[in-house]
Image: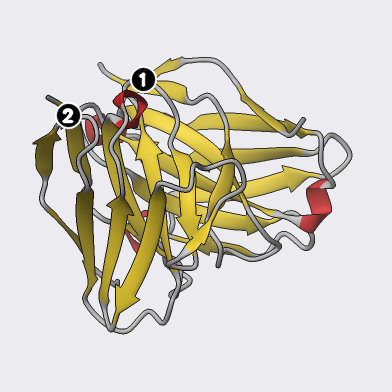
Amino acid sequence: QVQLVQSGAEVKKPGASVKVSCKTSGYTFTSYGVNWVRQAPGQGLEWMGWISGYNDNTNYAQKLQGRVTMTTDTSTSTAYMDLRSLRSDDTAVYYCARSSSSSWLYGMDVWGQGTTVTVSS
Amino acid sequence: DIQMTQSPSSLSASVGDRVTITCRASQSISSYLNWYLQKPGKAPKLLIYAASTLQSGVPSRFSGSESGTDFTLTISSLQPEDFGTYYCQQSYSNYLTFGGGTKVDIK
């Protein structure tokens, strides 16, 4: 079955960077994109960006431009999200989610379990 | 960015009730509107995509409709397992955005 398994919880200091991985299985990685979505404690969902599993094209949320980089490793069917210059308001659960098609148009149909990132001095 | 406004922000309903949640887009998004349900401590689950297409495995009591920039999620007969927070999300723009969520409690 299709699965997305994320790396474990992280605790970082302000100004540091975090890299979260999302290992996929059960489908052809290059036929779908991967989204990253985060959720601050008690808050709603915030889309961070999308990366194509086919050609590494990316779209990033404007508020994160310059701080976020999304990459893939097709040899291991894994997507990565790197967030730099961390602030306390980056504290959140970070999810990866497969696009239900090769583009971002038709929703996110399979989600990872979430990775808690805590930014604290 | 395209803003998505959901209403109500919360509701409480009884098992068997018909429940309606609305999502309004700040501009035309064609039919590129998706609905999710998130239960506490869990990842969201896709219910409906392209405004009215039921995701595989989702019960038929869920339905979606649209009128211009207004989109509606309807649960025809609320079940105990339907509690949680519902989110709409537009995918018309290449900068995706979610609505603020509607929390549904079972009376």
Query: Mark 2 highlights which residue?
Result: B105
**Looking at this view, is B75 or B6 the one in front?**
B75
Q: Nearer the viewer, residue A12 or A40?
A: A40
Numbered disc in front, either 2 or 1: 2
Q: Quadrant of residue B10?
A: top left
The residues bearing labels 2 and 1 have C-alpha atoms spaced at a distance of: 16 Å
- Where disc 1 sits, the SS reads loop
Which residue corresponds to the image point at 10% horizontal and 51% vertical from the top-left? B8
Amino acid, disc 1: Gly
Mark 1 crowd level (few <14, some 14–19, many ≥20, 10 Å Cα): few
- Identified at 40% across, 23% down, the residue is A117
- The x and y percentages for residue A57 are 67, 65
Q: Position of residue B22 (x, y in %)?
A: 20, 61
Total marks placed: 2
Instruction: Assign the N terminus of chain A to one quadrant of the image.
Output: top right
Compared with residue A70, is residue B39 higher up or lower down, i.e. above or below?
above
- Residue A46 percent coordinates (x, y): 34, 47
The answer to which of marks 2 and 1 sits earlier in the sequence is: 1
Q: Chain of mark 1?
A: B
Contact, CB < 8 Å: mark 2 with mark 1? no
**In the rendering, which numbered label is found on residue B41?**
1
Note whether residue A40 is visible: yes
